Amino acid sequence: MKPKEGLLVVLSSPSGGGKTTLCNRLMAADANVVRSISCTTRPARGAEVEGHDYYFLTRDDFEKRVARGEFLEHAQVHGHYYGTLRKTVEELLAAGRDALLNIDVQGAAIVCQLAKADPRLRHALVSVFLMPPSLQLLEQRLRRRGTDDEATIARRLAEATREMAHWREYDYVIVTGPIEEDYRQMQAIVDAERCRSQRLSFETE
């Protein structure tokens, strides 16, 4: 018994909500989960590495790729473009790997809309929203990160309020707490989705 194809796991949260940390924890524990590396026009932060954290593109290059239809989804967030390459996701699914998309609410909405018209995506799609327990805690996380000035933090918190209103549009919601508890819930979701009867095939088929 094996899955016919991989899952397309869309994971969203407000900025500073912990989705990157959770992605890394899940991939460290589950070898079949592979993060689809996004493209962005924003500068690299800290120790971020080209081809590992993001593909860092110029705005001109990004817009040319948009015109060629290379992105499964793309959006402009906080003044920078972000996008998921369609080819990367399709190759992972075909190989039976679970493609993990760490994307914002705007990008997730585009993927979900595309899935309505694409049976392959619709079959593979699983969406999860990380909900901060409160805006106060989210603000603390943003400040601890130490990468944003006061104006940027205020803008991110305002955007977070808007994004958190979309939680009902996701298949699952995890109210964030200790990372190991978040991971336990996330792994349980992935394991359950792999066991759905419509995703499985048997050697006798």
Image: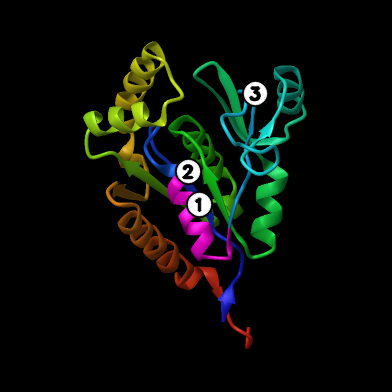
137 in relation to 185, above or below? above
Relative to the observer, which residue lies in front, 179 or 170?
179
Instruction: Give the main secondary structure, helix, strand or loop, of the magenta stretch.
Output: helix
Comparing 2 with 116, the one in front is 2
The label number, if any, that marks residue 20 in the structure image: 2
Q: In this orientation, does residue 165 appear? A: no
Which residue bears the numbered disc 3?
Answer: 41
Report the magenta residues as a range. 20-33
- Asked if labels 1 and 2 touch by Cβ distance under 8 angstroms, the answer is yes
Residue 16 at x, y percent in the picture = 39, 33
For image coordinates 77% across by 29% down, the residue present is 68
Residue type at tag 2: Thr
Residue at horizontal 71 percent and vertical 24 percent from the top: 62
Between marks 1 and 3, how big is the CA–CA gap? 22 Å
Q: Give the residue number, with chain letter if any, for mark 1.
A: 24
- Label whose residue precedes the other's in the sequence (1 or 3): 1
